[in-house]
Image (cartoon, helix red, strand yellow):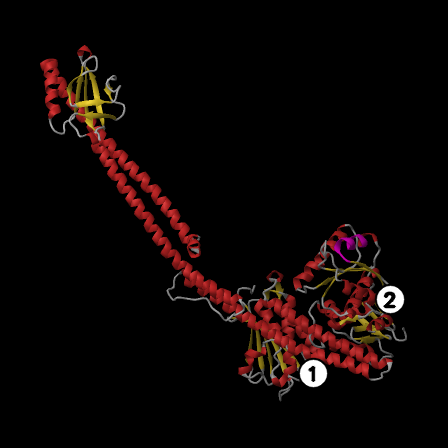
C-alpha cells in the first residue's frame, strides 16, 4: 500500500494523470461537437422533408379541398413508418391522423415546434409510448389545425450510440493510463530505489560505492554515470586530502617533537640566563619554520581549491623573472652556483605577480640547492621564452637531475626525494609552484637537461598578451 | 623573553596601541607582549566598540582583526578614514590571500599581516608604522653614526669614504637607515625593497644583508648592521645602546 502511495507521488503518475485529464477533455469536446453537428444535420433534413410534405399536402388541399386532404392524411398515416399526421377541429378533437396523444399546448402555436415534443402513437405497445418529435403546425380554415411531423428517434439513437462509444473509449483510456502509469512509474521507482540505496551506502561513508548503471544508455544511466564520475572525483580529492593530512602529521611531528625536546632539555639542565635565552631563541626559529610550513600548506590548498581568479591582472612576467634572478643572485654566488640570465623576452600576461614570483623563487631556490651535488661547476639558467609551445619560464640546472620515475612525485606535497632528504626546506616548494601554475591554467613540467633538471613553467597561450 | 629582548634592542618611543580583536586569548597575549615591549595597549572585542575607541582615543597605531563581530575590520578602518582619522592601521587576517591584502590596503589599512604570525614580526611592523607617520617629511640625507646616505645623489659614504652600491643594495640600505634603531624583518625588507609579499623560503634576504654588511662595515670602525635573532635586522650607530 505504501509503495502504491509512493507510486502516485511519482512524476510519471502526475504526468499521466494530467494527460488523462487533457485527453478526456478533448474527447468530450470532440464528441459533443460531433454529435451536436450530426443531430443538427439530421434535424434540418427532417425539417426539409416535413416542409416538402406540407407543400404536397397543400397542393392536395388546393385541388380537392378539405375532404381530399383528410383522406390523403388518413391514407398516409396508415403506412408503416409513416410521419406524424394530425388534424383537429376547432375544439381540439382529433379528426384524423396517427397521433393518439400529444403534449398539451403544442397545437396552439403555428409554425415549427420550438423544441422536440413528446407524443404517443396509436397502436403501440405500452412500454415505448412517448417519443420525441419535430413538427410543423398549420392552421386550416374553420379553426382546424393540421400537424405534420417526424419522429426524432433516429437522431436520438445516434446520439446515444456515440455517447456510449465515448464512455467506453474514455473508460479504456483511463484504464490504459492507469496501467502505463503503474508500469512506467514502477520501473522509474525501481531505478530510483536502487540509486537511493546506493547513495545511502555512499553517504554512510563507503566512498568506493557507485550508483548502478544498467547499460541501456537511457537518461537514468547517464545521470548515474555523471554522478559516478563526480563520486570518483570526490574520492580522488578525499584520498588526496587523506594523504596530505598523513603527510602533514608526519612532517610536522618531527619539528614539533624537536621543539618539545629542546624545551625539555632546557628545563632539565641547569642553565645560565644566556643558555635559556639561546634555547628559547632556537625554539622561536623552529616555530617560525613551522609557521612557514603551515602557511605554505594553506596556500597550496587554497590554490588547489581554485581561489581568487580575480586577483589576476596583466603582469610583467619578464620583470618578475629579473626580480627573482636579482633576489637569488647573492644566494647563488654564496653557494658557488653561477646564476645565468638566459633569453628573457618581454612578456605581459594575465597573472598574479606575487604568486608567479613565489613559484619561480621556489623553482630557482630548488635548482640552486640541487645543482651543487653535480660534478661540474654548478650553473643555473633562467630563461623566458615565447614560441609555438606558449610562454614558458625555463629553469635549468646541471645537477644530478631527477630520475624519470620520480619526476611526477617530485611535485607532490612534502616529497623530498630520498637523496635530498638532508637538504633544508619544507618539501613544499615545487608543489606550491605547481599549484600556482595550475591556478594560472598553465602547467609545471619537470624534464631532464642531460644532465640536470629542467623545470618549465608554462603559461596558457590564451592569457599571453 | 624574546619580548624583553625587543624592549631593549629597539629604541622606539613608547606607543599607545589600540587592538581590535575578538579572540580574547590572542588579544590578552598581544596586550601583555606589547606591554613588555614598553607600549600601552587598549583592547576592543568587537568592531563597534573598536570604532568608538579609535574615533575618540588618540592612538599611535591600531591593530585591527579583519573578521570582527558586529562590524567588519575593514569597515571600521574605512569609516575612520572617511572621518579624517589617520591613525596608522595594521590589519590582521586569517585569510592570507594576495587579493585580500589589496582590498585591505585599499580600505585604508597601512599594513597587512596574516595569521599565524610571529609576534616579533608584528612588533617590528607596528613600530615602523608609527615611525612612518611620525616622520612626516622625508629627509634627503640619512645619517647613522658615521654612515651617510644621500637620496638625491644616490650615494653612500662612511667616514668620508665612498661606498659603491648596486641599485638594490642602495634601496636596502635606504630602508634600513630610514628605520634605523628599529627592528626590520626579512619580509618587511622583501616587501619594501623588492615589492613582493611572499615569505622567502630560504635565507635570500640574509645573503643580501651580509653583502651589504660587507660593504658598509669591512674596513670601517664598528658594526652598524645588527642581526636580531628570531626577528630580523637593525641598523644602529655603534656605542648607542
Q: Circle 1 sits in a helix, a strand or a loop, which is it? A: loop
Q: Which mark lies nearer to you, 1 or 2?
A: 2
Magenta segment, which residues? B45-53
Q: Circle 2 sits in a helix, a strand or a loop, which is it? A: loop
Quarter of the picture containing the N terminus of chain A is bottom left
Query: Observer-nearest residue: A131 or B230?
Result: A131
User: Pointer 1: what residue?
Assistant: A335
Question: Does the magenta run of residues contain A378?
Answer: no
User: Pointer 2: what residue?
Assistant: B38
Does residue A50 sit above or below A393 in this rendering? above
Query: Observer-nearest residue: A13 or B147?
Result: A13
Residue drawn at x 39%, y 61% is A218
Residue, far top: A142
Indicate the position of residue B27 as horizontal and vertical percent values: 78, 63
Residue drawn at x 70%, y 79% is A255
Residue, far front: A126
Amino acid at each position: 500500500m505504501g509503495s502504491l502511495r509512493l507510486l502516485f507521488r511519482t512524476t510519471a503518475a502526475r504526468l499521466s494523470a494530467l494527460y488523462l485529464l487533457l485527453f478526456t477533455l478533448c474527447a468530450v469536446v470532440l464528441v459533443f461537437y460531433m454529435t451536436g453537428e450530426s443531430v443538427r444535420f439530421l434535424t434540418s433534413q427532417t425539417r426539409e422533408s416535413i416542409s416538402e410534405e406540407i407543400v404536397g399536402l397543400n397542393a392536395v388541399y388546393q385541388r380537392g379541398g378539405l375532404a381530399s386532404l383528410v383522406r390523403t392524411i388518413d391514407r398516409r398515416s396508415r403506412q408503416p413508418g409513416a410521419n406524424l399526421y394530425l388534424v383537429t377541429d376547432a375544439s381540439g378533437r382529433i379528426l384524423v391522423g396517427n397521433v393518439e396523444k400529444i403534449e398539451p399546448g403544442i397545437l396552439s402555436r403555428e409554425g415549427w415546434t420550438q423544441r422536440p415534443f413528446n407524443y404517443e402513437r396509436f397502436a403501440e405497445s405500452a412500454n415505448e409510448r412517448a417519443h420525441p418529435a419535430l413538427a410543423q403546425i398549420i392552421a386550416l380554415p374553420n379553426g382546424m389545425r393540421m400537424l405534420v411531423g417526424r419522429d426524432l428517434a433516429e437522431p436520438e439513437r445516434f446520439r446515444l450510440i456515440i455517447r456510449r462509444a465515448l464512455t467506453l473509449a474514455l473508460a479504456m483510456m483511463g484504464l490504459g493510463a492507469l496501467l502505463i502509469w503503474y508500469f512506467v512509474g514502477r520501473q522509474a521507482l525501481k531505478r530510483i530505489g536502487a540509486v537511493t540505496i546506493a547513495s545511502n551506502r555512499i553517504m554512510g561513508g563507503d566512498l568506493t560505492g557507485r550508483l548502478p548503471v544498467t547499460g541501456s544508455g537511457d537518461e537514468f544511466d547517464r545521470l548515474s554515470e555523471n554522478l559516478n564520475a563526480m563520486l570518483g572525483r570526490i574520492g580522488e580529492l578525499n584520498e588526496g586530502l587523506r594523504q596530505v593530512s598523513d603527510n602533514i602529521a608526519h612532517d610536522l611531528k618531527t619539528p614539533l617533537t624537536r621543539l618539545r625536546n629542546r624545551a625539555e632539555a632546557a628545563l632539565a639542565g641547569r642553565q645560565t640566563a644566556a643558555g635559556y635565552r639561546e634555547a628559547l631563541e632556537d625554539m622561536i626559529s623552529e616555530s617560525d619554520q613551522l609557521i612557514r610550513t603551515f602557511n605554505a600548506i594553506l596556500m597550496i590548498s587554497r590554490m588547489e581549491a581554485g581561489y581568487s581568479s580575480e586577483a589576476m591582472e596583466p603582469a610583467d612576467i619578464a620583470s618578475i623573472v629579473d626580480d627573482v634572478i636579482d633576489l637569488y643572485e647573492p644566494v647563488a654566488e654564496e653557494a658557488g652556483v653561477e646564476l645565468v640570465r638566459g633569453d628573457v623576452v618581454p612578456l605581459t600576461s594575465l597573472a598574479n605577480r606575487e604568486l608567479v614570483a613565489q613559484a619561480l623563487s621556489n623553482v630557482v631556490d630548488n635548482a640552486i640547492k640541487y645543482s651543487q651535488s653535480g660534478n661540474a661547476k654548478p650553473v643555473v639558467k633562467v630563461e623566458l621564452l615565447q614560441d609555438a609551445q606558449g610562454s614558458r619560464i625555463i629553469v635549468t640546472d646541471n645537477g644530478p637531475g631527477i630520475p624519470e620515475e620520480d619526476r611526477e612525485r617530485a611535485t607532490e606535497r612534502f616529497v623530498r626525494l630520498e637523496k635530498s632528504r638532508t637538504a633544508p626546506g619544507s618539501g613544499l616548494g615545487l608543489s606550491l609552484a605547481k599549484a600556482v601554475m595550475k591556478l594560472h591554467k598553465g602547467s609545471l613540467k619537470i624534464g631532464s637537461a642531460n644532465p640536470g633538471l629542467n623545470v618549465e613553467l608554462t603559461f596558457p597561450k590564451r592569457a599571453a598578451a | 623573553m624574546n619580548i624583553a629582548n625587543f624592549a631593549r634592542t629597539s629604541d622606539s618611543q613608547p606607543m599607545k596601541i589600540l587592538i581590535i580583536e575578538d579572540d580574547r586569548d590572542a588579544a590578552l597575549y598581544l596586550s601583555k607582549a606589547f606591554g613588555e615591549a614598553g607600549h600601552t595597549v587598549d583592547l576592543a572585542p568587537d568592531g563597534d566598540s573598536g570604532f568608538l575607541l579609535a574615533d575618540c582615543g588618540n592612538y599611535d597605531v591600531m591593530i585591527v582583526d579583519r573578521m570582527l563581530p558586529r562590524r567588519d575590520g575593514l569597515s571600521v578602518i574605512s569609516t575612520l578614514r572617511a572621518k579624517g582619522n589617520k591613525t596608522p592601521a595594521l590589519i590582521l587576517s586569517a585569510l592570507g590571500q594576495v587579493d585580500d591584502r589589496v582590498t585591505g590596503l585599499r580600505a585604508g589599512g597601512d599594513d597587512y599581516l596574516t595569521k599565524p604570525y610571529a609576534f616579533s614580526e608584528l612588533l617590528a611592523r607596528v613600530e615602523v608604522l608609527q615611525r612612518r607617520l611620525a616622520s612626516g617629511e622625508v629627509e634627503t640625507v640619512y645619517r647613522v653614526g658615521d654612515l651617510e646616505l644621500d637620496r638625491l645623489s644616490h650615494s653612500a659614504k662612511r667616514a668620508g669614504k665612498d661606498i659603491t652600491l648596486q641599485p638594490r643594495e642602495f634601496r636596502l640600505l635606504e630602508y634600513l637607515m630610514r628605520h634605523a634603531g628599529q627592528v626590520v624583518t626579512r619580509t618587511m625588507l622583501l616587501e619594501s625593497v623588492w615589492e613582493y609579499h611572499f615569505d622567502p623560503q630560504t635565507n635570500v634576504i640574509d645573503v643580501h644583508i651580509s653583502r651589504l654588511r660587507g660593504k658598509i662595515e669591512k674596513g670601517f670602525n664598528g658594526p652598524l648592521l645588527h642581526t636580531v635573532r628570531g626577528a630580523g635586522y637593525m641598523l644602529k650607530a655603534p656605542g648607542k645602546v
